[in-house]
Image: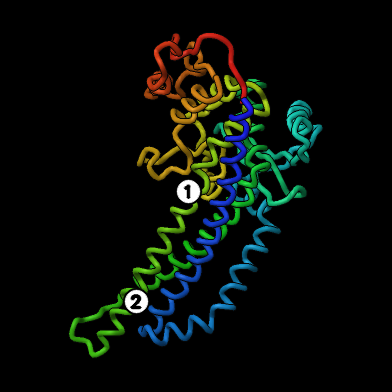
Amino acid sequence: MVGQAFGLYSHMRNNRIRSRFLIAGLFALVYLMTWGLLLMALGSFEEAGRQFLAWLPFVTLGAGAWVFIAFRINVGLIGALSGSQGLSRDDNPKLYRMLENLCISRGLSVPKLAIVESEALNAFASGVNDKQFTVTVTSGLLAQLNDAEVEAVLAHELTHIRNGDVRLMIIAVVIAGVISLLGEVVFRGIARRNVRMSSGDSRKGGGIAILIGFAVIALAWFLAVVVRLSLSRSREYLADAGAVELTKNPDAMISALLKIAGRADIEGVPSGVMDMCFENDPDGFDDLFSTHPSITKRVQALVEMAGGRMPDMPPHPPRVAERQDLPTMVEESAAGLDPALRGPWGQRPGGSASL
């Protein structure tokens, strides 16, 4: 048990170090985007290089200022984008007591609570310091999950706060958002100008520089998305494990995951906010480019590593008649287990263990 705890915290520490490198990489992408823009504007490698060195301090200050502003307004901005409203203790005293008990058990400051009126089952944390930290839940989550499952979701979001994931994700989303905005402006400008470059042009070298600048901007845009996705995917396993550590109830986390599966999409919320949510349903490419591991993988990790048990039956009926994937999902989650650990629907015999 001690070795397991040491391994978990070592992994958390290593992830924080890797995340800092990824954040530094995002700043590097801002510089890469700037160089690409100068290449396209000037059509000369030499002139673009000189201008880049002259602009470098201003680009750094600008990126830093944008991050500082985002640090100050991130909760309000995310609240406006998601349509969330603050939730007072009088509005839901039971939820507040649940959150306070979890925080007291680990000596954490109690974050604020907010709610999004939506049938979706989801939650997310925002903020960069103790004064800002806010856990937001949907009304659908509170309506459909029992107390133990809600507690598991709250513990998951508290773990994101405790591990520093929320702060890092906000930085990543902010910087990636700037790169995406610049890239979109450039590509829209190119489409409007309808630039034509013939092979016999006297400024052939300039045309090549413009093409390379275009490719650099496209690469920076793509890498910004990849970096943002890599920040959130690896953290969900840690947050699930941290939630089990807080609640001592892996079964509740498994049940919550299975109930939320396929019902997490909050209508009208931008992808950057959905990346921060408890679950972000993949759109079309399975989980290849999803910000979260699949529910099947998360459940299987909890069964194999945290002593969780699969439920005897799917925890809820499909939302529409066409969705019959939950029994399959439960079976797939259990498929990789040792046969001795499977029961009905993959249930593990005996009691559960905590991290």
- Dot 2: within a 10 Å radius of its alpha carbon, few (fewer than 14), some, or many (20 or more) residues? few
* Residue 335 appears in the figure: yes
Quadrant in which the N terminus appears: top right
Whether residue 180 sits left or right of residue 43 in the image: it is right
Callout 1: helix, strand or loop?
Answer: helix
- Give the mark, 1 or 2, whose residue is nearer the N terminus: 2
Residue type at mark 2 is Arg
Of 1 and 277, which appears nearest the observer? 1
Are circles 1 and 2 on residues that touch, CB within 8 Å? Answer: no
Relative to 26, residue 278 above or below: above
- Label 2 sits on residue: 193
* Residue drawn at the location 41% of the way across and 70% of the way down: 186
Q: Amino acid at mark 1?
A: Ser
Residue 119 appearing in the image: no
Outermost right residue: 90
Q: Nearer the viewer, mark 1 or mark 2?
A: 1
Q: Quadrant of the C terminus?
A: top right
Q: CA distance from mark 1 to mark 2?
A: 35 Å
Does 286 appear above or below 311? below
Residue 221, picture quadrant: bottom left
Mark 1 Cα-neighbour bin, 10 Å: few <14, some 14–19, many ≥20: some
Residue annotated with mark 1 = 230
